[in-house]
Image (tube, rainbow, N blue to C red):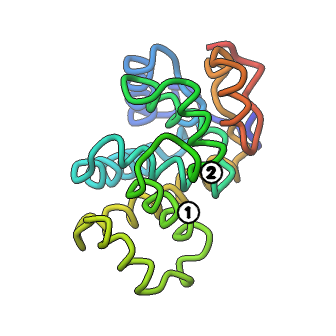
Amino acid sequence: MPFIETPDASAGEQTAAMYAQAEAGYGYLPNMVRSFGHRPEVMANWSALLASIKANMDLRRYELVTMAAARELRSSYCMLAHGSVLLHDIFTADEVRQIAENPNEAPIDEAERAIMRFAAKVVRDATAIEKPDVDALKRHGLSDAEICDVVTAAAVRCFFSKTLDALGVQADGIYEKLEPGLKAALVVGRPIDETASN
């Protein structure tokens, strides 16, 4: 259960619309959406910002950057959500588990390893990023614009993951259905919400 009371759809038109849209898309109302019930305009702006960042990135790269950031942030919710995205026609469950546990040994290419290390460093301490870190990505073929995309994708994850964790929001019960080894690798912080089966 979150640390704050979350409103139901009667809280206002924006909240009701946000809940309805989420239920239509997911088939249930995710805890992450409910947590923004008091401030649906913040969720709307977050979604718009995220869409603008994702529009410039390949899905696989975006998800790997997000996984690296979420792992550094110890965000179970984001690890579970984005690990599940990677399961759809990109990686097997065992491959996603390897990425979650140790990207340096996972079945991804060297450029992707470098990108994940860089994203983790952005989250861990952005002031520690130096020109050689950026130059290393350029040696893997990334342009200045693509490096900017990696940075923004990692940085925005800090907002979302920290918001959910600070409010005590747990990942939805639906993630209990994941293969046990994969689930264990993705739960890096707060446990899955066992009060809702979704």
Q: Nearer the viewer, residue 161 or 41?
A: 161
Q: Residue placed at 53% from the left, 38% from the top?
A: 37
Residue 184 coordinates in the image, percent (x, y): 73, 31
Q: Residue placed at 51% from the left, 25% from the top?
A: 9
Q: Residues within 10 Å of mark 2 (few under 14, many from 20)?
A: many
The answer to whether marks 2 and 1 mark residues whose Cβ atoms lie closer than 8 Å is yes
Residue 66 relative to residue 80: left or right: left
List the residue tagged with mark 1.
120
* Disc sitting over residue 32 in the figure: none
* Amino acid of disc 2: Arg
Residue 103 coordinates in the image, percent (x, y): 56, 49
Query: How far apart in space, not on screen, are marks 2 and 1 (Cα)?
Result: 8 Å
Q: Residues within 10 Å of mark 1 (few under 14, many from 20)?
A: many
List the residue tagged with mark 2.
71
Count of numbered circles on the image: 2
When asked about the image quadrant of residue 188, the answer is top right
Residue 93's place in the image compared with 7, above or below, is above
* Amino acid of disc 1: Ala
- Between discs 2 and 1, the one toward the N terminus: 2
Residue 141's place in the image compared with 23, above or below, is below
Q: Residue placed at 45% from the left, 53% from the top?
A: 65
Q: Nearer the viewer, residue 167 or 112?
A: 112
Residue 166's place in the image compared with 195, above or below, is below
When asked about the image quadrant of residue 94, the answer is top right
What secondary structure is found at the residue carrying circle 1?
Answer: helix
Q: Residue placed at 68% from the left, 39% from the top?
A: 169
What secondary structure is found at the residue carrying circle 2?
Answer: helix
Residue 169 relative to residue 3: left or right: left
Residue 87 coordinates in the image, percent (x, y): 47, 26
Quarter of the picture containing the N terminus is top right
